Image (cartoon, rainbow, N blue to C red):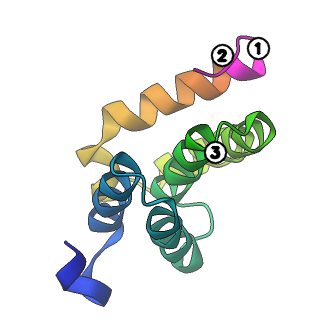
Amino acid sequence: HQMLGAALDADGRLHLGLIHLAVGETAAARAQADTILKGAPTHLYGLVLRIRLAEAARDAAATQRALRAYAAAYTSERAKNLPEYEQHANLLVETKDLADRTAAGTPAR
């Protein structure tokens, strides 16, 4: 993935960001989130990475902000029917459920 560089689409950047997170390379994961969001400020993949980054940092306030941003963007983003959203529909719905539970007072994982 990394060798593809600028040729990566949002899906590739999501995968690469998750790999970076899994091995503790948070700066590289953040770069993938930032790149996705630079092109589309409410793209759910970039917001998912922001949530995961905040969770990895054990930053409750940042996690809450990221979950709120995700929840705010979810309906309008899903209405765009982007093909990449169907590839990871379960991830997107699970993240929305987490955002909804957190907003209702149930702590994030």
**Cβ atoms at labels 2 and 1 below 8 Å apart:** yes
Q: Which residues are magenta?
A: 102-109
> Which quadrant would residue 75 be assigned to in this image?
top right
Task: Identify the residue at horizontal 24%, vertical 76% (top origin).
Answer: 2
Query: What amino acid does circle 1 point to?
Result: Ala
In front of the other: label 1 or label 3? 3
Q: How many marks?
A: 3
Q: Which residue is mark 2?
A: 101
Residue 53 shown left or right of residue 2 in the figure = right
- For marks 3 and 2, give the CA distance: 17 Å
Task: Identify the residue at horizontal 24%, vertical 47% (top origin).
Answer: 87
**Disc sitting over residue 104 in the figure:** 1
In front of the other: label 3 or label 2? 3
x and y percent of residue 50 in the render?
Answer: 58, 52
Task: Identify the residue at horizontal 71%, vertical 47% (top origin).
Answer: 69
- For marks 1 and 3, give the CA distance: 19 Å
Query: What amino acid does circle 2 point to?
Result: Arg
Query: What amino acid does circle 3 point to?
Result: Ala
Mark 1: few/some/many CA within 10 Å (<14, 14-19, 20+): few
Q: Which residue is mark 3?
A: 54
x and y percent of residue 68 in the render?
Answer: 74, 39
x and y percent of residue 1 in the render?
Answer: 19, 72
Mark 2: few/some/many CA within 10 Å (<14, 14-19, 20+): few
